[in-house]
Image: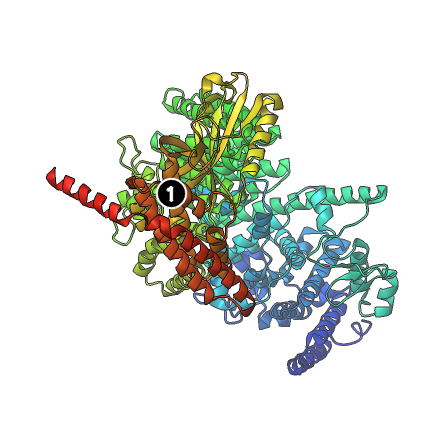
Amino acid sequence: MTVFPCWIALSLFQWIFAYCKRINAKAVTLMEPTPLMSLKLDFLRILSAHEHLFPLNLPFAQSSAWMRSQPASPSPSVSSNNSQGSINSNSPLQNSVEISGAFKQQHFLIGLTLSELFAIFEVPNGALHVKAINVIRNLLSWHDSDPRYALKEARHRLAHLYLPLIGIIMEHLPQLYEFVADAQRKGSHLPAAIQQSVAMAIAGTPTSTADIGRRDNGDAGGQSRRPTLNAEATRHLLACFMWIVKSADEHTLRGWWEALQGQRLAQLLEIFQLTTHCFEYNGPKTLHTRGHTGVQREELKSMLGDAILGSILNRNDLGKRRAGGTLSSQNSVTLGGEGLRYRKDQLWRQAPMTYFESVEAKNEAILEGVLSAEITLTILDSVELIVQVISGQGILQDQLGAAFKVILHALSCSQSVQVYENLFACQRSMVSKFPELLFEAETEYCADLCLRLLSHCSSGIAAVRSQACASLYMLMRQNFEIGNSFSRVKMQVTISLSSLVGTINDLNEDFLRRSLKTILTYADQDAVLKTTSFPEQVRDLIFNLHMILSDTVKMKAYQEDPEMLMDLMYRIAKGYKNSPDLRLTWLANMSQKLGERGLYAEKAQCLVHSAALVSEYLHLLEDKKYLPLGCVSFENLSSNILEESAVSDDLMSPNEEGICTGKIFTEAGLQSLLSQAADAFEAASMFEGVNEIYKIVIPIVETYYDFKQLALIHNRLHEAFLKIDRLNGKRIFGTYFRVGFYGMKFGDLDGEEFVYKEPVITMLPEISHRLETFYAEKFGTAYVEMIKDSNVIKKNLLDPEKCYIQITFVEPYFDRWELRHRPTFFLRNYGLRRFVYSTPFTQDGRSHGDLHEQYKRKTIITTANAFPYVKTRIQVIAREQSVLTPIELAIDDMQKKTEELHCATKHEPPDAKMLQMVLQGCIGTTVNQGPLEIAAVFLSHPHDQPMTALQHKLRLCFKDFSRRCSEALKRNKTLIALDQKEYQRELEKNYQRFHDSIKPMLTYNQEMLAADELENSSTNSTC
């Protein structure tokens, strides 16, 4: 570094340029150029560490007014490969914001460093990314702490040197780490976490167009193939970005941003949005965890010190400073020789903090909070400047929405009270200046804003609640002044509150009620609008919101009772049948709750009902042939779907202001719901439902000739059909139980019966224990009693002070004609409304007796809706009973055994184990009440007595049963291995013994039987 004062700068720069050029040429020829590129970065870092770096880079000092006076070029700059700007290529401003040849000539060292950063981003190596970004970060840190550059003018000129870094970040926007997506995966504390669900789409939270732009940009320009930066590198890069924006001259930034085209301006706004989330303050605990997601704090400090001092390549010194630890090439640390390895994707598990570490952590938390506030306030200033730029140019008006999204996103993040005050002030200013942004029919920012404001109205901080109340009231007021009604805001506020109470468990109802009272006070004391209908409309809205909050109280009371909670949400959704937006919101809330419990079949039904409702209103708005005709098109998916029919006179017209204006009431919204329903059906292993979903989707996609999407759809259908074939006979969809509640303590449930759908292979003791435990905790163990049998309950014999629960296993029931229309296993487990259970009894009051004494009461119950439904328990609305006499019971049992034999024999692919189990139970049985004993009891009688019709039917059942046994034995003979031949012979011997024993009973008195049949036929002909 001592050569700088002695050499002519130009000659020295030529030497540096030639040296870097040789390194680049050598790197191209190497199989692994990473070490050489790392050395080049060290070389640039050492060069940049010179104390006179700033003067050596000749920062320009032209006036800002002169820069802004330069005309804009109609075409993009040639010097920037992908630039969308329209700045004159010969202007000083153009040369200062892009890494052009002119920029490198005037600012050689900085230009060389930034060019290297641009090139490193193309290399799939995270360590190089961090190293290159750290070079820039260290430079800016030194500049920021250098007292020579403390003056404002000096800061402006310093920031101008690094303006091309903003363009580099914009070019590589798709490579930045997705902090927003990461937060959504973990779950956010604010309603932003709901954006991934349909609820927020219904409530008006649009999918970010900036995100779409990022994806499109990546696909179009090959960005998706570039390596993605990790969280640490992205955070440092965005910190550099914010330092430049904060330090740069406002006039220069304005001149540059005025010259940007719409897409580039949208990218800039997205960077601001990403930065807001990146530097969101989440408290000291989160900060402490985040600080240990790689290596130890001491090692990070050591590495940073080595980087500054230029000795990072000194392996020996680095090893000494680690005091026994080693840094592997995979960025992991091994400590103390214990072989315990820590990687970047694992949390650092450390010992409890000492007092000094605790103080340090608190100080870090304070600094983190100050940094977060400073960055957010800088972003607000920048967004305000961009809004001024957009206001002055009509062609950029489309970007107003992107600017407003940055503010909305900042409102969804954790901020300090000071930042919130500035955020709300900025939000109110934008709404006042651009009311059409919120209240036009095709925009949805109003819904998103209402959601954010309501969430802050429940804040525990009085200052935040006050600001949120003021913003919400001003929103209502402005909407009313435009059209003498604020129906749009009224609807969106109601939808937003419904979404909040349905999805956020820790919503503070008390603070929210206080905020609503404050808004009502504002309306009553507003002298300007006191004589209008505005105060009355506000009172009506507040009353409706209080009713929704009352439902919230009930929901909180049933948080531990999932069935009752879903019943309550279902009743609320049903109450909004005449308001499609609100019904969709509550269906979305139910869908989210069901998904959290892993009930994907029910979640799919919620989404299907939502899609049917949207289809109904789309059909009313405009009739398009390729769109479904309404609920009718969804009948194959659910027999309950006609609930969503829009036929009532009380239904709101879709043409009313504020009604059906959400993004969900579009073709794209319908496709989104159907796509989510297909995912849910697949998760529930109901692949037939996926097929029915895409029968509705395919005509829509074909209309737009989206062949790529069609290919994806048909590929997914191909996989679904293969799974249906592969899992034939191996799927189980649910277990059903009848549950009756008896006792005054149950309230509305007293005397009601439900059919519960439980997860597969749920045993009776499991559900019995679950319900008994829950209600014992609620009412007390002494007051809850489980009824063990399935007999008819006589309420007058029950103790009125106790609660009784009766649980019975039930099976789906079908008539014989119905079975012909349900040939597959899926169809026999889908759309179920009738169930059957049996109660054995004898004439003398016992439950079980001998064969000739055993009766059975067969009870068929019908539910109000068909399973699967949007909830897991459905009320029983009808029942029918029939009593089977002993011989009828025997006929029923033999028919079941025959059917089991037939299914096991015809099963494809053949299942030898199942077939042998069924055979063993039919002809290998040695227990009482087997087929042979049934024949002996009911078919053995004196020869001089005529055979009854039931005996004749039982005889035919045995003949059919014997034939099926013979077929099963022949089938089993083709499936057994050599070591099972003895077992086959034993089965054949048992069958022959059974056949010989039963043959006399089946061929008994054939002459008398023929005479009886002839006599019966002649009697009938005479009649």
Q: Position of residue 439 (x, y in %)?
A: 39, 39
Please determine whether, in this image, residue 980 is positioned above or below residue 835.
Answer: below
Residue at (79%, 54%) from the top-left corner? 297
Compared across the picture, whether 496 is left or right of 488 comes to: right
Compared across the picture, whether 245 is left or right of 594 comes to: right
Q: How is the image coloured?
A: rainbow
Q: Position of residue 177 (x, y in %)?
A: 60, 57
Residue at (46%, 61%) from the top-left corner? 726
Q: Which one is nearer the viewer's eye here, 47 or 232?
A: 232
Residue at (36%, 65%) from the top-left corner? 707
Q: Position of residue 691 (x, y in %)?
A: 37, 56
Residue at (62%, 24%) from the top-left corner? 781
Compared across the picture, whether 369 is left or right of 919 comes to: right
Is there any visible trace of residue 717 in the rendered image? yes
Is there any visible trace of residue 486 in the rendered image? no
Q: Which one is nearer the viewer's eye here, 153 or 137?
A: 137
Give the residue at mark 1: 940
For badge 1, the amino acid type reads: Ser
Mark 1 element type = loop
- Number of numbered discs on residues: 1
Q: Would you identify the image quadrant in which residue 644 lies?
A: top left
Characterize the local packing of mark 1: few (<14), some (14-19) or many (20 or more) Cα atoms within 10 angstroms.
Answer: some
Q: Position of residue 610 (x, y in %)?
A: 39, 43
Please determine whether, in this image, residue 740 is positioned above or below residue 585.
Answer: above
